[in-house]
Amino acid sequence: MSDDTSLTLQQVAERLKVSQNGVQILIDRGDLPNAYRQGGEWRIPAGDLEAWEA
C-alpha cells in the first residue's frame, strides 16, 4: 500500500480485526500519530498502519 493512501477507521479496524473503538484507542494513545480528521471522519495514513504492524 502506498504511503500517500489513507484509510478510514472502519478499514483499519477490518484489517486489524478489531473494533473501531480499538482503532480509536490506538489513535488516542499515539500509536497512529499521523491520523487526522477529514470531513468529520478519521483518516489513517497507510504508512502509519504499516509501521505499527511491523
Image: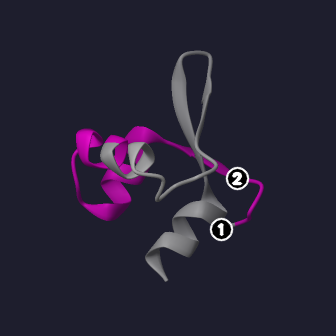
Kindly identify which residue carries mark 2.
5
Q: What residue is shown at x 58% (from left), y 52% (from top)?
A: 33
The image's mark for residue 15 is: none
SS state under label 2: loop
Residue 34 horizontal side relative to residue 31, left or right: right
Task: State whether residue 17 is above or below residue 35.
Answer: below
Q: What residue is shown at x 65% (from left), y 65% (from top)?
A: 47
Q: Quadrant of the N terminus?
A: bottom right
44, 29: nearer the viewer: 29
Task: State whether residue 24 is above or below residue 37.
Answer: below
Magenta residue check for 12: yes
Amino acid type, mark 2: Thr
Range shown magenta: 2-24
Q: Position of residue 54 (x, y in %)?
A: 49, 83
Q: What's the CA distance linking mark 2 and mark 1?
A: 7 Å
Q: Position of residue 6 (x, y in %)?
A: 64, 47
Kindly identify which residue carries mark 1.
1
Magenta residue check for 16: yes
Query: CB atoms at circles 2 and 1 under 8 Å apart?
Result: yes
Q: Quadrant of residue 3?
A: bottom right
Q: What residue is shown at x 73% (from left), y 65% (from top)?
A: 2
Q: What residue is shown at x 42% (from left), y 52% (from top)?
A: 12
54, 5: nearer the viewer: 54
SS state under label 1: loop
